[in-house]
Image (spheres, rainbow, N blue to C red):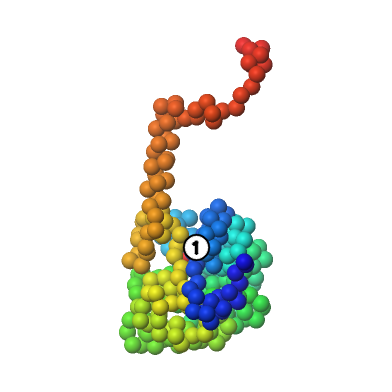
Amino acid sequence: MKNTVSTFQQAKANGEKVSMLTAYDYSTAKLIDEAGIHAILVGDSLGNTMLGYEDTISVTVEDMIHHCACVARGAKNALVVCDMPFMSYQTSVYDAVVNAGRLMKEGRAQAVKLEGGVEVAPQIKAITSAGIPVCAHLGLTPQSIHAFGGYKVQGKSEAAAKKLLEDALAIQEAGAFAVVLECVPSKLASLVTSKLDIVTIGIGAGNGCDGQVLVYQDMLGMFTDYVPKFVKQYAQVGEVMKQAFCEYKQEVSEGTFPAEEHGYKMDDDVIDKLY
Ligand code: KIV
């Protein structure tokens, strides 16, 4: 069954958890979709995991459209949520609506995600008024990494926790259907979840959230540049891949691959005429 923003609302009402994973290409999206995950986030984390940047700052709207369109072709039932990259919405409400529209029209996203609270509430209001569902993102918002001075847990002091709660209420009021809470103490994430009618999706925010999201290369052990504390590696796919690449190299060097069964046959009399 196709997941929509209504699925999120129903899940919260019924006390059912929402599952979300990132994907950036067709084959991965298809596997995630077949596993029955509710939503796929085409995260701007693709800057790190796919493009090899050290942060998400350089990711463009064109990058997001390109990867989102691949994911949308592979996702039959999962809701496809596409990140709005750095400076595609902060600059003005107009830019925010135009760029959200491009992610929907050209990237075939079914919802967009943007980072920030009170300060981006006008953008969320305008995008949702244009008929585009918006997921917000609070706590550790990677596009503000230079303002934070590093990847740090957010909302630990009384003032910061109060601000996070105010931001969450403001983005709900502006019309967001969900909010990602990243690197937030578990107790604060649970409190925010209990105060909101919309779905909270945690990453490094404990199990009191309405749902969870992980970067798929992190949970498969494929991205090892940096493994955050909140990541659980469900498999060591990176090791399996590396082992297969080594075996392939060995067999190519030895001449044992390709074997006869990997080749195509033709009549001997045809080839004999060429000698
Ligand atoms: O870009 C991304 O993948 C994200 C998740 C970490 C929530 O925003």
Give coordinates of residue 132: x percent, y percent: 63, 75
| Residue at image mark 1 | 22
Is residue 266 shown above or below 215? above
Q: Is residue 63 visible?
A: no
Q: Quadrant of the C terminus?
A: top right
| Among the 4 quarters of the image, the one containing residue 106 | bottom right
The residue at the point 40 percent across, 81 percent down is 190
Give percent across and percent down for residue 51: 48, 55
* Residue type at numbered disc 1: Thr
Compared with 223, 125 (above or below) is below
At x 56% / y 78%, what residue is drawn? 10
Q: Is residue 151 visible?
A: yes
Total marks placed? 1
User: Left or right: where does residue 169 sit relative to residue 107?
Assistant: left
Q: Position of residue 107 (x, y in %)?
A: 62, 62
Q: Residue furthest front?
A: 14
Is the distance from the Cβ of mark 1 to the nearest ligand 1 atom less than 8 Å?
Answer: yes
